[in-house]
Image (tube, coloured by chain):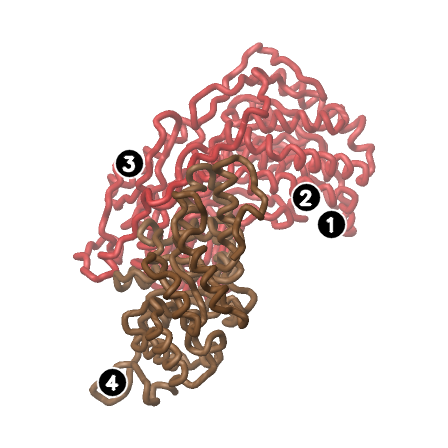
Amino acid sequence: MAAEGGNGKGAVGPSGVRTYPDFSAPTVDKVMVEERAASLGKRSIKKEAKVAGLLLSIAMMDLTTLEGKDSPGKVTQLCQKAMRPHASPEVPPCAAICVYPKLVPVAKRALAGSSVKVASVATAFPSGLSALDVKLDDVRRAVAWGADEIDMVIDRGALLAGEKTRIFDEIAATKEACGQAHLKVILETGELGTYDLVREASQIAMLAGADFIKTSTGKVTPAATPAVTLVMLEAIRDFFYATGKRIGMKPAGGIRTAKQALHYLVLVKETLGDAWLTPDLFRLGASTLLNDVLMQLEKERTGAYQSGDYFSKD
Amino acid sequence: MTAKETIVSATNGETHAAPSSPAQRAALEFGKAWTYAPAPEAADHVRIDPRYELFIGGKWVAPSSGKYFDTVSPSTEQKLSEVAEANERDVDLAVKAARNAYEKYWSKLSGIERGKYVYRIARVIQEKARELAIVETMDGGKPIKESRDVDLPLVAAHFFYYAGWADKLAYAFPGRSPRPLGVAGQVIPWNFPLLMAAWKLAPALAAGNTCVLKPAETTPLTALLLAKIIEECDLPPGVVNIVTGAGATGAAVVAHPDVDKVAFTGSTDVGKRIQKALSGTKKKLTLELGGKAANIVFADAPLDQAVEGIISGIYFNQGHVCCAGSRLLVEEGAFEPLLQKLRDRMQTLRVGDPLDKNTDVGAINSKMQLDKIRELVDAGEREGAERFSAPCELPTRGYWFAPTLFTGVSQSHRIAREEIFGPVLAVMTFRTPDEAIEKANNTMYGLSAGVWTDKGSKSFWVSQRLRAGVVWANTYNKFDPSSPFGGYKESGFGREGGRQGLLPYLEVD
């Protein structure tokens, strides 16, 4: 197993055997967790609660573009949108821009002087199926180019093959390569098959040093779902109970409507409580969500839906 | 109401010094970072008449005594309407109307024609579901979320389900020539007013009987709206009669000599009195009475989902549920993590205006019930159990009780033995599966139970040994019209729901 490899991060004990922390996690009942997640989608969020929730969701948004055709022009436009999503002064800037490593310098320049962070996917995104050295190099370069946050992917093939210690070691090595940059660990839950494995992968990632755990790359269906997000929030809760450490959560992929965004906020509010209702601990990864949220905000302000052409498409 | 924060002890009776692990220091806060604005369900389109008469023989009839009683909303203590009080003479009229309808119309109809009427009731209920849910919530105090998403869909489903049986009775009991009994006298409780009416009326009508139904005195309104629906559905006069009143009215329905079958859902005390009163008569009887269900959580259970099952098991409908999971039995190894999760989850329960769409726990059904809950909770504290109540703000008007749990409970404590019928959970521990089964079965009741484990073989092994009519595995409080429901021991006898639920309303060879 990976523990024998050169990058093993488990502690070496007196007997010379590498030991790892306890990865075991409580099991998850599929029916009940889906029911609970769906029931939280029935909260009725109206008026000032809706406006506050929508503004919060903008402040928590990682505005994302991860396409092969991404160019400096496209990324620069998206950065402008992230810094000033709408003309209304009460609309906050987004939390971050999320781009491929090569576009980090562009984003960094465009965002200079603003509060918006630059997040970069790395580690042979989206599959993670490259040599560890290559993946770590990917991370170091993204950080050197100015990334504040690194969104890594785990090697799902290895996890499904039972190589838990390899996953742990790779995350720990990536964390080291991040230096000061924050590390988000993408589990790609749509490929893991069971909530039990999602829960276990969350546990491994947090033990290995993740600052955030994230559902998906956006390249696989299903991506983020309320139920899988709830499973990960519950893993974060257990980690907090055990260590007192607050790990962040980022659902990403398939979040397109303001209603979905509010559903995720409700999940956080009623699972982890007040402390997590901040961009420091909760993010929404999305490419097309922002305009729907803005449209809903304008509807609350004016009482009528505006044409889509009133909102910039960047 | 003082909520006393306590340090959890792993075993009954003993207290340990709290270890200062990070787990004990880490506390989640569920406060005001982002609050939900009030989201009240609009009730202005709902019409509640200032006064309701008795529904007898297809007509609205004034009570012979001329007496009416108020029905109030338990969340506001405001009078919603006044309702006729039926005495023995009125009940006699109702039974005569039912007998007449049975002989003249209902027993002469083919099953397929009877079924059409029952389907029609189901459809109109669906059409008026929103209005019925609102009235159910106003009259009984349960959250609109539950009356809208649980009660009403199940009410319609019961009528649809039994409508389908009406022309297939010969197939339900092949070779046993099923025949209706005649007139059914039915007395129902206040916790699921309309749903219990559906549980009683739907199988009785489908099987070919006529009915005299007595709703509970604190929650008569939806049964009266159902009477209007039955009127609208143009059922032959007298097939369904609804007589309102308190205990004396119910006693008159049960005791009437021309009633062929009695069905009662309610307290075990009243059930025992009914059984005594009926001894020596030829009346058929089914009783669905109290419960003190054990919800058993093994250490290998999906703990976070078990917490949801525990919450819905005891706080659903303010714990006014005969099959409520009111005793939590936890394997010792899972006690601390489970209780930590459970307490945190209780903090997120939203207690208040039942008409608010975000309310999780509504009002206690009546002052009388609130007093009973308080008395038993006081007894729990006196007997030395440790109380934790959710830190919620309760409205000043109306009847309220904060979701509560007790740890350090012994099998001998009153809160572990008596049905509280409120949002109060008694938590106990066990060490082995045998001990869990022994403790779970150590009660006079036997209506329901829950088993939480990730191991399929264990859930089957345990559930086969639980003396309870319904056992839920890795879920709780799930109902379906096709599934029979009923009790062991002092939880009653007879089954409601499913093919089995037809039998109490039929004579078979």
Identify the element where label 2 is drawn.
helix
Asked if badge 1 and badge 3 are on a common chain, one would say yes
Q: Which residue is mark 4?
A: A12
Alpha-carbon neighbours of circle 3 within 10 Å: few (<14), some, or many (≥20)? Answer: some
* Left or right of B201 on screen, residue A16: left
Q: Which residue is nearer to you in this view: A244 or A25?
A: A244
> Which of marks 3 and 2 precedes in the sequence?
3
**Mark sitting on residue B378:** 3
Identify the element where label 4 is drawn.
strand
Q: Which residue is nearer to you in this view: B392 or A167?
A: A167
> Which of marks 1 and 2 precedes in the sequence?
1
The amino acid sitting under disc 3 is Asp
Mark pair 4, 2: CA separation:
68 Å
The residue positioned farthest toward the left in the image shown: B17
Q: Is residue B55 visible?
A: yes
The number of discs equals 4
Mark pair 3, 4: CA separation:
56 Å
